[in-house]
Amino acid sequence: MDYGKFKYESALKARESRKNQAQTIIKEIKLRPKIDPHDYGTKKSHVERFLKAGDKVKVTIMFRGREQSRPELGFRLLQRLASDVEELGFVESQPRQDGRNMIMVIGPHRRKSEARAERASRDSHHSERASRSRAADTAVHEAPADEQLTSPPQPANGAEPAVEAQPAAQAQPAPAQPEAQPAPAQPEAQPEPAPAQPAAQAQPAPAAEPAPVPVPKPGPRPAPPSRPDAPKPGPRPGAQSRPKPEAPKPEARPKPPSRPRPEAVAAQARSAASRAAAPEAGTDS
């Protein structure tokens, strides 16, 4: 006996058994004794949805403050809810007081595996219908254009097909023209007169177009009336012209002494040296 093969087969069996199992889940809905009718309808729809899916529902009534002295209000509300969902579930646990809350458990009539199988069959049915409609649409789009053009339209509700309209030339025969009477014999020199055109073929003269009506141009706008100039207010009687004080002129700053240029200093030094050498030359002579 191969132990590895046995272990592998047992694991496969356990996996298949888990697929068929359905775990029951307990859903919880909380209510208040003074719940509004619209809110009660919403909570009841949730309970119905849970029971249809095969889950249990735990209904809890919460009491606050002085509501704890009136537990019969919560009991009546639970009995009302149980009677409303009687077709989908039954009361598994009767209402009981648990501190500030009152609890009741409602169980579904059918198992969760049955609900899951029904849901799977419904989904497969919807998917099959969708695939059929999609295949029909693709067949219509892929049909050749010649077949769509040549195939006559089918009448709706068994009505007779409409007769195709014939062209006007074939439907109404042309009126018989009167036989031409033989013309009297005339000499060969005279030409035959041209046949007169019927009045129906004569083209009517085009109607004369009406002359355009000249549009008057707007003239210049009249100038607005001039307003008389208002007199300007004169000077106040008490006001006198006062001379403005003259601002003191700034004192002139002494100019800094100019520095002698180096060329002039060198020239003065040469001239002084030449003067000093002149008397020395006179004494030697």
Image (tube, rainbow, N blue to C red):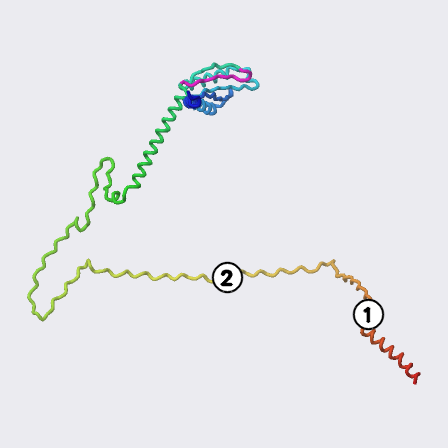
Q: Dot 2: few (<14), some (14–19), or many (≥20) neighbours within 10 Å?
A: few
Q: Is residue 52 visible?
A: no
Q: Secondary structure at mark 2?
A: loop
Q: Earlier in the sequence, mark 1 or mark 2?
A: 2
**For the residues marked 1 and 2, what is the alpha-carbon distance in whole angstroms?**
81 Å
Q: Report the residue that reaches farthest toward the bottom.
A: 285
Start and end of the magenta stretch? 98-109
- The relative height of residue 156 versus residue 90 in the rendered view (above or below) is below
Q: Report the residue that reaches farthest toward the left.
A: 185
**Residue at label 2?**
222
User: Dividing the image into 4 quarters, which one contains the N terminus?
Assistant: top left
Would you say the magenta stretch is mainly helix, strand or loop?
strand
For image coordinates 29% across by 61% down, the residue present is 208
Q: Position of residue 86 (x, y in %)?
A: 41, 18
For image coordinates 89% across by 81% down, the residue present is 278
Which mark is nearer the camera, 1 or 2?
1
Residue 99 in the magenta stretch? The answer is yes
For residue 263, side relative to residue 37 (left or right): right
Which of the labelled discs sits on residue 259, or is there none? 1
Q: Secondary structure at mark 1?
A: loop
Q: Is residue 196 visible?
A: yes
